[in-house]
């Protein structure tokens, strides 16, 4: 997945503002025992291997970016920087650099979500769920969310579409069996049943995104069947009948994707030569008059 854009206006502006207003700097430290997790932190689990790698880096280089906290009771609650906090505990740190800021509950939830959404290791489905949480809980529009996250509105909309996938297909994505490219191709299928069947086929046969895109129309059969067929003109039927009699083989005169076509069947090279010998200038004149 491509690396996310910068912090956006929300979180970055808040940290900068905290430094100016409160006089706190990145060198401000707190005892790690006085800091506690936000119980409403949207992200409940963190990759243990990644935490251990960050912990090793902190042992060698220290915490390069302070975490954002707010005063809560007798201690301080994390607003942003949960991973750095967890890794610092693993590294055995007694103190950690912080920025302290007065923030209300609604803003804490929003900032925690934004921080998670801007991490490079989120899956597309995790992003979609995070977007949906922000839109629903904070009453944001897609355009407002796009500005906060420094993304285009179309990127937000395309990611949110993943939430339209059936639960079974979402589970395949969470298991790493389907990519976002596969998911977008599957969304081209109109019915939920068709989406599930196509997803199962993709996983079973290990299909590429291009192969999935090519198959998608075949799994939208319901729409194709419900579309009324335009009957062939009488002139097409008369022409086909006369050509069948003249050439002594099956002939179809039809319209395909806006183009008129004549199809002449033959069994082998000998029959092809026989048909060609019968198609001579002047012999088809009666067909034009039909």
Image (cartoon, grey):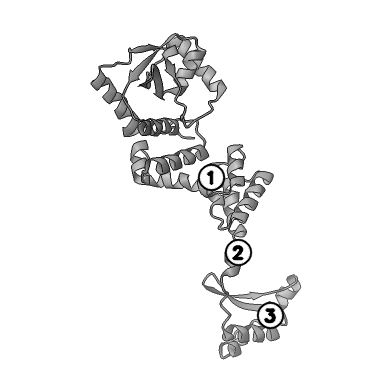
* Residue 208 seen from this side: no
* Residue 238 seen from this side: yes
Q: Residues within 10 Å of mark 2 (few under 14, many from 20)?
A: few
Q: Position of residue 180 (x, y in %)?
A: 53, 43
Instruction: Residue under label 2, please give it.
Output: 222
In this rendering, would 122 be left or right of 96? right
Residue at 48 percent of width and 41 percent of height:
128
In this rendering, would 111 be left or right of 209? left
Instruction: Residue under label 3, please give it.
Output: 277
* Secondary element at image label 3: helix
Q: Position of residue 54 (x, y in %)?
A: 49, 18
Residue at 50 percent of width and 37 percent of height:
126
Q: Which mark is residue 74?
A: none
- Label pair 3/2, CB-CB below 8 angstroms: no
The image shows residue 217, relative to residue 103, as above or below, that is below
Discs 1/3, front: 1
- Label pair 2/1, CB-CB below 8 angstroms: no
- Label pair 1/3, CB-CB below 8 angstroms: no
Q: Quadrant of residue 117?
A: top left
Discs 2/1, front: 2
Q: CA distance from mark 2 to mark 1?
A: 24 Å
The image shows residue 290, relative to residue 200, as above or below, that is below
Q: CA distance from mark 1 to mark 3?
A: 52 Å
């Amino acid at each position: 997945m491509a690396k996310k854009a910068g912090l956006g206006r929300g979180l970055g502006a808040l940290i900068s503002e905290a430094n100016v207003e409160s006089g706190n700097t990145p060198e401000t430290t707190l005892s790690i025992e006085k800091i506690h997790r936000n119980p409403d932190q949207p992200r409940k689990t963190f990759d243990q291997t990644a935490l251990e790698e960050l912990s090793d880096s902190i042992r060698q280089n220290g915490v390069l970016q302070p975490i954002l906290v707010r005063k809560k009771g007798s201690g301080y609650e994390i607003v942003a920087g949960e991973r750095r906090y967890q890794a610092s505990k693993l590294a055995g740190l007694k103190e950690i650099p912080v920025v302290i800021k007065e923030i209300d509950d609604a803003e804490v939830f929003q900032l925690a979500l934004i921080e998670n959404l801007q991490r490079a290791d989120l899956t597309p489905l995790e992003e979609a769920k995070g977007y949906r949480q922000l839109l629903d809980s904070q009453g944001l529009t897609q355009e407002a969310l796009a500005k906060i996250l420094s993304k285009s509105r179309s990127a937000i909309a395309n990611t949110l579409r993943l939430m339209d996938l059936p639960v079974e297909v979402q589970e395949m994505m969470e298991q790493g069996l389907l990519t976002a490219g596969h998911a977008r191709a599957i969304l081209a299928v109109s019915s939920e049943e068709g989406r599930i069947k196509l997803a199962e086929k993709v996983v079973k046969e290990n299909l590429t995104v291009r192969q999935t895109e090519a198959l998608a129309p075949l799994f939208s059969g319901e729409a194709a069947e419900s579309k009324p067929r335009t009957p062939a003109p009488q002139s097409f039927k008369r022409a086909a009948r006369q050509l069948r009699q003249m050439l002594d083989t099956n002939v179809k005169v039809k319209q395909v994707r806006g183009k008129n076509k004549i199809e002449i069947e033959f069994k082998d090279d000998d029959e092809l030569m026989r048909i060609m010998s019968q198609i001579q200038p002047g012999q088809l004149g009666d067909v034009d008059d039909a």
